[in-house]
Structure formats: structure tokens, C-alpha cells
Amino acid sequence: MLEELTDTPGERLLGDAYAADFDRHFWQIGEPGFWKLERLQEFQEPTDDSWVAFSKGDWPEALRLLEGRREALTGHYAKLRAHGFETWRIRVVEQPLTDYMRWELRLLLLRDELGGHTRVIDAGKVRAHEQDGPLPELITLGDDVVYRLLYDENGLQEGGVRYTGSGLVSRCREFVRALYHEGEGIGGFCAREGLLPAGGEQ
């Protein structure tokens, strides 16, 4: 998949240009839905209040702020369903889990509970696809567009490369979908890793 995208012309979009393009396509997704592959193990998210608390070592505050998003996320996923689509995400994980990954998995666990379908797959199961390098971070939006996300050396997202063409978008979506179905439910994974909130699985 990395080789196919590398060999295909795409449009590099950075900063506000990427955000505007993404938003323009997002609400037109339709039944094929939103599919995302996440591969990197470390990110910087300085605009996220919970991540900032986590990065300062205040884990209780980071979790409190995540839980504070429950109402907004409930409304977000209800709005997506009203627009006729849902989201699916496969998260590649390496052992031992990074501290960042432990934080992100708690966010993804909440999203999964509220409607953002999420599974986890061990990095060992994707090695066969990585002869040319780590799998890219990918998002497909309906049948129209796929983005290969771009990050700087510190893990800050810079934007993405946009690819179009129904054949390529479909192949990327089916690749992500196949990994998703091979993955494990995030609730079971978090339970095994001791990441569930007090009181059990969400």
C-alpha cells in the first residue's frame, strides 16, 4: 500500500489548506464511511487539553478531561449517523506500549463506546506489509478521497497528501477494512493491558 501511494501522484496539502479540504469532503462521506489506519506510536497534540495534562505527568487530570468529552462525543457520533455514515479505525500497537499510546487508547476506548468503532492490531501482524517502510497513516472519506497524513519529526501533523480516483480510494479502504477485521476489539485489549477505567469495561 505504501508503494502504491508513493507511485501515485497526489496533492500535498499543509496546514489550513488540508483542514479546509478535509472538512469539505468529510460531511459528504455517505454510506462507505470513514476508515482510518493509525500506525505511528508517538504524537504531539499540544492543542488537546487532555494530552497537555498527560504530557505534564498529570494522568488523573488527563483522564478527567477525557471523560469530560463524553457529552460532546455522544452528540458528534449522533450527528454522523444523522448524515448517513459512521467511522471505523484500526490502531496498530507495539509492545511495550508507549506512554502516549496508553493515553490515546483511553481516548479511543471512549470513542468506541460512543460510536467510533475501533479495533487494535499488533504491529507484528502488519510486518508483511512493511517491506518498503512503516505503513502510512491513512484516512479514506467515502468513495472520493484518501489522505496519507504527514507529520514532522516531532510527531506534529503538518497536513496530508490527497489522492482521488475511486479505484485507489476503494483499494485503500479495503486494505484498512481487512486490517480492521483482523484486529481485536479495543475493550478486550484495554482490559488485558490494565487500561480500563475503575469499575470495569466501558
Image: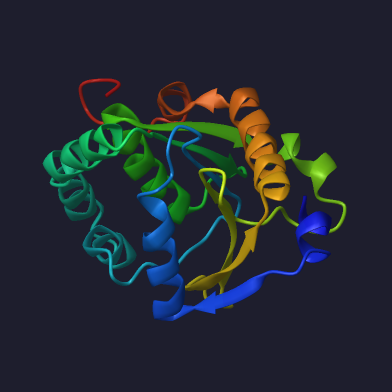
Q: Which residue is painted at 37% across and 67% down in the image?
A: 45
- Residue 61 locus on image (x, y percent): 17, 54
Q: Is residue 46 above or below residue 59?
A: below
- Residue 4 locus on image (x, y percent): 81, 55
Count numbered badges in the picture.
0
Q: Is residue 151 above or below residue 171?
A: below
Closer to the camera in the image, 22 or 127: 22
Tell me if 170 is positioned left or right of 101 in this view.
right
Q: Which residue is painted at 28% across and 70% down in the image?
A: 47
Closer to the camera in the image, 30 or 91: 30
Residue 178 visible in this rendered orientation of the protein = yes
- Residue 176 locus on image (x, y percent): 63, 38
Closer to the camera in the image, 171 or 116: 171
- Residue 164 locus on image (x, y percent): 64, 58
Closer to the camera in the image, 196 or 78: 78
Q: Which residue is painted at 77% across and 50% down in the image?
A: 1
Tell me if 176 is positioned left or right of 106 in this view.
right
Residue 196 visible in this rendered orientation of the protein = no
Q: Residue 197 occupies which quadrant of the picture? A: top left
